[in-house]
Amino acid sequence: METRRDRLRAATVREITETARRILVEEGPEAVTLRAIAREMGMTAPALYRYFGSHGELLRHLVGELFNELTGELTAALARVPEGDLSGKFLTASRRFRTWALAHPREYALLFGAPVRGIDDQGQADFAEECARQFGWTFMALFLELWNRSPFPVPSDDEIDPVLLPQLRRYRDDVVGVDLPLGVVQQFLKCWIRLQGGVSLEVFGHLEFALADAAPMFELMLAETSPEIGLAYRPPADG
């Protein structure tokens, strides 16, 4: 049974996490220190150690919470798509991922950018990693649904680069945990690299040398990827 003390502790952890995120957004990851958070909250830095054992543990907790938020956004968006509309699900998840990333560039950078100093401390590692797995499974579950309902052409093992074969097998066995043809695993990774790679280039400003508005290029990527996995591309309803 949850006690009043438990509720107070949970509320304080939420406030610490929200304060850390606000500092991240306003000042960048290097500004997210225990001292800065304590100052914002009117606490002493040593008092924060009652809730997080280290700076790295706090950052890992923030990473987990951000993955949970992103997963929730995708799940809510997918729930509004009719059950049998596989094309709609793929397009909705992809577009919602990009929308969240562009709306939250510093949060996105914490999740998908270069490692932040101190974040590799192992405190809260299980929480952050589990939240990241749940996010990844949102896309993997969708991909499995596509494959199971309407299998699309994939290369045989003999047609896959031999350097990739053991890597794909290890990823399938250790991460995916589903007995899939390696060609399906390769196709999933191809789709994810295109999606996450393109979004990252846009979020981090690496397309601005040529594109003031990268949305049409993103839609072109979706239009080219959709038929590869047996789906029909549809432009967004608002454009």
Image (cartoon, rainbow, N blue to C red):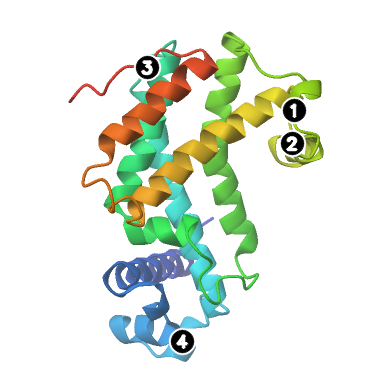
Mark 2 or 1 closer to N-term? 1
Under mark 2, the amino acid is: Leu
In the picture, the disc for residue 233 is 3
Q: Residue furthest front?
A: 210
Amino acid on which the number 1 mark rests in the picture? Ile
User: Which mark is first along the chain, 3 or 4?
Assistant: 4
Q: Are marks 2 and 1 in contact (CB under 8 Å)?
A: yes
- Quarter of the figure with residue 173: top right
Residue ID at (31%, 81%): 41
Q: Residue furthest left?
A: 238
**Amino acid type assigned to the residue bearing label 4 in the image:** Ala
Residue 6 percent location from the top left of the image: 48, 65
* Nearest the eye: 123 or 188: 188
Residue 151: percent from the left, percent from the top?
61, 11
Q: Which residue is mark 4?
A: 47
Q: Residues within 10 Å of mark 3 (few under 14, many from 20)?
A: some
- Would residue 118 be visible to someone looking at this image? yes
Label 1, label 4: how many angstroms apart (C-alpha)?
55 Å
The label nearer to you, 3 versus 1, is 1
Tell me: 164 left or right of 122: right
Q: Identify the residue under disc 2.
A: 168
For residue 121, above or below residue 225: below
Q: Which residue is mark 1?
A: 160
* Kind of residue at badge 3: Tyr
Residue 78 seen in the current view = no
N-term mark: 3 or 1: 1
For image coordinates 64% across by 58% down, the residue present is: 126
Q: Nearer the viewer, mark 2 or mark 1?
A: 1
> Quick check: marks 1 and 4 in contact, CB under 8 Å?
no
From the image, state whether disc 2 or disc 4 is nearer to you.
2
